[in-house]
Image: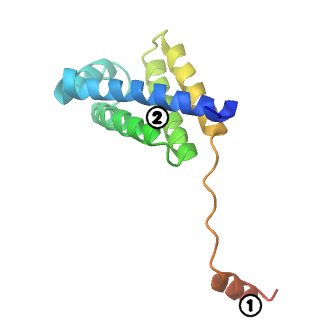
Amino acid sequence: MSLDPRRFFLLAIRIYFGIWLLYVGLTKWILFGPANFIAMITTTFDKTWSPHLLNVALAWLIMIAEPLLAVLILCGRKERAVWTAVSLFLFMLTMGQTILMKPDVIANWQYLVLAVACAALSEPEPRKQRPAQVERYDRETSGR
């Protein structure tokens, strides 16, 4: 394998993290079931200041986002955008753990830092070249 260290790191994390997140996401659908997972989230978060409707939306977001983000990670397209979305999702989970005052919130911070590192190390999508006619029109209308 002739990958430079950055590409090797991103490939390995993409595979490991993607498979893990897919497992975690599918477990909620297959083993828990949507009703049980939503009940668990709402029961836990209804004890805080968070409104019930927001807690139901949070549960659905988690159930949909985990497998979806996992598939996007494993596909390897638009890596920076995907890892940025993953880091935002993980920040949301970290804030949830913080609201619950759970001491294991540090684990979510570690995943968050990992996702941000992957976003930072991923190449940005190349900007599309504008057609020559558009460029010419812009020059003519701007007076340059």
| Position of 122 relative to 23 (above/below) | below
Work out whether residue 62 can be spotted: yes
* Image quadrant assignment for residue 65: top left
The percent coordinates of residue 118 (x first, y second) are 60, 34
Tag shown at residue 89: 2
Residue under the image location 55 percent in, 40 percent down: 84
| Position of 130 relative to 136 (above/below) | above
Q: State the residue lying farthest toward the right.
A: 144
Q: Is residue 56 left or right of residue 17?
A: left
Residue under the image location 54 percent in, 28 percent down: 12
Find out whether the residues at labels 1 and 2 contact each other: C-beta distance under 8 Å: no
| Amino acid found under the numbered disc labelled 1 | Glu
Q: Secondary structure at mark 1?
A: helix
Work out whether residue 116 can be spotted: no
The percent coordinates of residue 35 (x first, y second) are 17, 28
Q: Earlier in the sequence, mark 1 or mark 2?
A: 2
The percent coordinates of residue 138 (x first, y second) are 70, 84
Residue under the image location 72 percent in, 89 percent down: 141
Task: Name the residue that disc number 1 marks.
Answer: 140
Camera-side residue of 117 and 13 = 13
Q: Quadrant of the N terminus?
A: top right
Q: Residues within 10 Å of mark 2 (few under 14, many from 20)?
A: some
The percent coordinates of residue 33 (x first, y second) are 18, 26
Q: Quadrant of the C terminus?
A: bottom right
Tag shown at residue 3: none
Q: State the residue lying farthest toward the top.
A: 103
